[in-house]
Image (cartoon, helix red, strand yellow):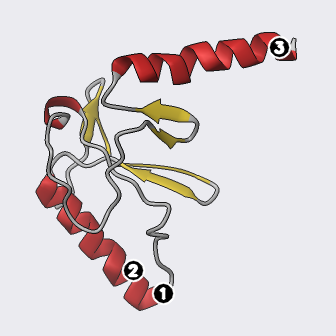
Amino acid sequence: MIRGIQVKGKELKLTQYADDTTTFVKDSASLGKLLELLDHFQQCSGLKINSTKSEAIWLGKYRNNCSKRLDLKWPQDPIFALGTAFSYDAYKCEVKNFHEKATKNAKDV
């Protein structure tokens, strides 16, 4: 019931590394179902997401959506998932994902 996004013909819903989890959902209904599932997981396990660290961003055709659904942070600045910046501003993404990293790597050499 949770629909992910399409990336090169494959559905992507979840990425995880150590204690970092990033989810990708196709629409608001899927986001609601995801949060219901996480709430159920919390009730069963006693574990819960850290809402102070949880951020959301609309992507693709929804990027101009202004609604701030549910109890999530919807920042205008880039958010990071496993070191990759996502933003509404393509220039900020380019700076964060390429220019800043290239400059840092050049200094490290």
The x and y percentages for residue 105 are 76, 16
Q: Amino acid at mark 3?
A: Lys
Query: Which callout, 3 or 1, points at the residue further toward the start of the chain?
Result: 1
> Of the residues tagged 2 and 3, which is closer to the observer?
3
Q: Residues within 10 Å of mark 1 (few under 14, many from 20)?
A: few
Find residue 41 and name its label.
2
Contact (CB < 8 A) between labels 2 and 1?
A: yes
Contact (CB < 8 A) between labels 3 and 1?
A: no
Q: Which residue is mark 1?
A: 45
Task: Provide the secondary structure element on which disc 3 rests.
Answer: helix
The x and y percentages for residue 21 are 49, 55
Question: Spatial distance from mark 2 to mark 3, Cα to Cα?
Answer: 44 Å
The x and y percentages for residue 51 are 44, 69
Residue drawn 14% across the image and 31% down it: 61
- Left or right of 104, for residue 49: left
Question: Spatial distance from mark 2 to mark 1, Cα to Cα?
Answer: 6 Å
Residue drawn 12% across the image and 59% down it: 29
Q: Quadrant of residue 79?
A: top left
Q: Which residue is mark 3?
A: 107
Residue drawn 27% across the image and 65% down it: 34
Q: Residues within 10 Å of mark 2 (few under 14, many from 20)?
A: some
